[in-house]
Image (cartoon, coloured by chain):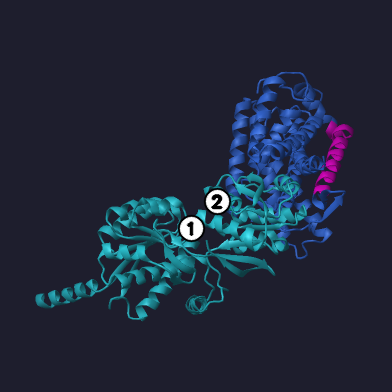
Amino acid sequence: MVFLNLLLSGCARKQEEERIKIGVILPLTGLLSTFGQSVRKGVELALEEVNKGGGILGKQIECIIEDDESKTDGAQTVVTKLLTKDKVDLVLGEVVSSATLAIAPLCQRYKVPLVTPSATNVEVTKVGDYIFRTCFIDDFQGSALARFAFENLGARRAAILKDVKSDYSIGLASAFSKTFKEMGGEIVNEQAYAAGDTDFRTQLTSIKASNPDALFIPGYYTEVGLIIRQAKELSLRITLLGGDGWDSPKLVEIAGASAEGTYFGTHFSPQQPTPRVRDFVSAFRQKYNEDPDALAALGYDALRLVADAIRRAGTMERVKVREELAKTSKFTGVTGDITIDENRNARKPLVMLKIEGGKPTYLTSIEL
Amino acid sequence: MNLFLQQLINGLAWGGIYALIAIGYTMVYGVMQLINFAHGDVFMVGAFVGLVIAQLLPDKTSPLSVFLVFLSAMFFSTLLGILIERLGYRSLWRKNAPRLSLLIVAVAISLLLENSGLLLFGAAPRSFPEIIPSKSYFVGSIIFTNLQLIIILSCLLLMGILHLIVMHTKMGRAMRAVAEDSEMSALLGVPRERVLSFTFALGSALAGIAGVMVALYAPQINPLMGLLPGLKAFIAAVLGGIGSIPGAMVGGFVLGEAETLVSAYLSSSYRDLLAFLVLILVLLLRPQGLLGKGVVEKL
């Protein structure tokens, strides 16, 4: 009996050793649960596909998914558990920058690579050489949008209406303004609002008087929806554009018909006409009976990119995996071709959408 | 010049809305020397009643629906105003409790209403349905919308009606008597408690209507939306001279325009700063306000 027990536990240990363990930290409940659940769906779909294809290095991948309840201290608790008890080979997460910044120092100390699918704050990857991200950063987004406004829309005089309460909005605005001026454009008016405002007529009136070709609104959909509506009311007949803060079905709900003909940049569109995206969308629909959103696509790409790096490393040694992650170049993801740069940030295209017939429609991809 | 006129028009709608809310503050202060800090939340309740009714109605944009939305918002906020006075203030007022106690109750009612709103509707902002489809009109290069027109005209109309009530009805006369000298009016047989109820009802009805107006003009509402406009209207009432109805109207329009001009020519970040600066300056330099009586009282 004792012998049998030993035999069984030996087997179990052997099986465990043959698995590659990836810890996944997501906000599955609480305030950010919709983000966390989307990423989880993408990660699980990618996991299923990799494992069905025989895993990597002949081993299956096991994802240990932990919920941090949308709290930064929750993220710290579960990352400690993953690093010390489960002894994972790699950590994937978190969704938002604040929680990612909370867990990054621990991963760096244990020298376990951390890959975040969606934290866009510049500081995240500055924590150390084991911290990576597979999404673009705010600066990139602002610059790419400026390029789109200048080259694709032919705008030369741009105005900006930014949310002074949000670092995201301020960051996007300054990157946009810098690139737009470098390209030879002129920022003719820069106005501000604060998150929670509902009346923007004053700012829009003064923007109108400065006669721009395009208005850049780097905000979140709640205010942007109202801004678009009030711009129409004041018959501001210029192109309106913004970033991924616009990416919500609520935008069109709030702005109504006024949203027609506006543009925004984001991470992903299910309509992108590449075979890679088509396959992903149909597999996602089959598994979950819904269309993937940007976060699901980012989660999917993150896990596949990690699997690819491990395959290239040929071993589970963390130093080697880290090196291969850093060497990632032109990885074909559903959110575009991803190259990891020297700051461990992703270089990838910005997907531009135009709202037509009440729906965001894929237009083009912008690279810098 | 056109730009300046355009900005004045933008400010006019907010001016009217501030004035409507400020009237409620000033009337209640007139009859019972109380700053009813729950007043801004009555305004919020008006907007949410409007939202619920608008969502129930099948044909949202018909004139009848619009009328029903305004009427129900007015009805429920009137009811709420009467309830607040009955349950919150009356027993304290009867006992001649210190004014500070009444003020604390006012803050408590305000918190109660806000948090009940959060419980019922959640903190996320809600879109208000477009029951009056927006249209823009041009005069030369100046644009105004049908909503701005409706808001300003109805504000003026309501102020006209209020003037008639206060100056030419028995209840209005009673209100003025209580405001003039509360104890003397009681000795002369003025039913003071009925006057209090009536004053709260009147002020709350105006706040309810203002709530729907704001919901139409800036169609995103949340349970904390009453906080800032409530404070601004209070400032408008102080600016005009607290206790004076024409003062509240003037104060509302002056503040609305001043805010718009500050965000137009300086920066929108200074808008709220301006309002509170006005409050401090008025209290320091002219505590009786623009049109108030020259009696200086400690608050």
- Give how far across and how far down residue A130 sits, in percent: 33, 57
CB atoms of marks 1 and 2 within 8 Å:
no
Q: Tell me: residue A366, above or below residue A223.
A: below
Q: Chain of mark 2?
A: A
Q: Which mark is residue B1?
A: none
**A64 left or right of A148 in image:** left
| Amino acid bearing label 2 | Ala
Provide the major secondary structure of the magenta segment: helix
| Amino acid bearing label 1 | Leu
Q: Looking at this view, is A361 or A44 the one in front?
A: A361
Q: Colour of chain B?
A: blue
Q: Return the residue found at the far top.
A: B295
Q: Which mark is residue A175?
A: 2
| First reached walking from the N terminus: tag 1 or tag 2 | 1
Magenta residues, as a range? Answer: B148-172
Q: Where's the N terminus of chain A, which quadrant?
A: bottom left
Q: Residue at x 70, y 62 (%)?
A: A256
**A77 left or right of B252 in image:** left
Q: Which residue is mark 1?
A: A32
Q: Residue at x 63, y 58 (%)?
A: A150
Q: Residue at x 73, y 28 (%)?
A: B239
Q: Is residue B159 magenta?
A: yes
Discs 1 and 2 carry the same chain letter? yes
